[in-house]
Amino acid sequence: MNRITFQPTSSGLWHVEGIDCNRILRTSRNLERQGRWADACECRADAVQQLLDVAGEESVPLDWNDSSSRAALELIYASAIDYFSIDEVEMATALWERVIDFDEEDHLQATIMLAFCYVELEDYDCLESVISDISPKTAEYSLLMLWSTYRQTQGVERDALREMRTRHKVWWEEFVASEHPADEAFLADRQSERPSHRTEAREFWFATAPMWERNKDFIEAISKA
């Protein structure tokens, strides 16, 4: 087995050596396509554990433009999703925090998932530390305000509700819909260079669906408000 190391690049950032993160990422995706989800999760988890063991507590800034380093970040992010989907929210949160440690520019937008997790964990100090990195003009921000207010007060934040219903109407319709089909039209648009707002909204629904399954009362509350 090759020894995993982090090596400096001319950009002042770092890249990963000694582990083929691109191959591992492809293998895990192939396992998913075969319906072997548990094997895919284990494949990613093993690779991520090796990477984190080498990095330790250090914040090693990885070079997003380096293929291996980018794949390493994608592996950590994907492994966070794996844990998130099985209710291991604290583990998912720790992994998304590591993604940002390794990539301060947050190319994968881990900050957004972190913010939603912090609300579920009721860690509002950490929420405050990341919320300024999410644009108030986005649908994600309005949804986050609804989620945070509901989690703390069991009430509905009226300004955020109005924003969702007007400025982010497509997102609102998606989140209160009874079905979210992953049909051929959605899958094709998802692969296009410029996915529609509806496709983006549905993608975010799928990304956060495990959270709403755990907190069905939230979606019910905003639907009836």
Image (cartoon, grey):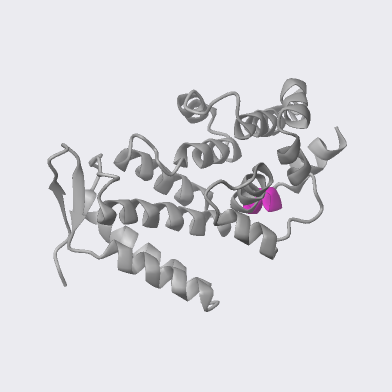
> Which quadrant holds residue 162?
top right
Q: Residue 57 at what x, y percent from top left? A: 25, 43
Residue nearest the observer in this picture, 134 or 1: 134
In this image, 225 relative to 209: left or right? right
Give the residue drawn at x 27%, y 46%: 65
Residue nearest the observer in this picture, 114 or 152: 114
In this image, 184 relative to 36: left or right? right
| 211 is within the stretch colored magenta | yes
Q: Which portion, as a residue range, is magenta?
A: 209-214
| 104 is within the stretch colored magenta | no
Which residue reaches farthest right?
Answer: 224
Q: Does the image show residue 87? A: no
Which residue reaches farthest front?
Answer: 193
Give the residue drawn at x 19%, y 45%: 14
> Which quadrant holds residue 86?
bottom right
Residue nearest the observer in this picture, 62 or 53: 62
Query: Which secondary structure type mostly characterizes the magenta part of the structure?
Result: helix
Figure check: 76 above or below 146:
below
Figure check: 129 above or below 122:
above
Which residue reaches farthest top?
Answer: 159
In this image, 88 relative to 198: left or right? left
Q: Does the image show residue 22? A: yes
Q: Residue 113 at what x, y percent from top left? A: 52, 42
Where does the N terminus fall, quadrant-wise?
bottom left
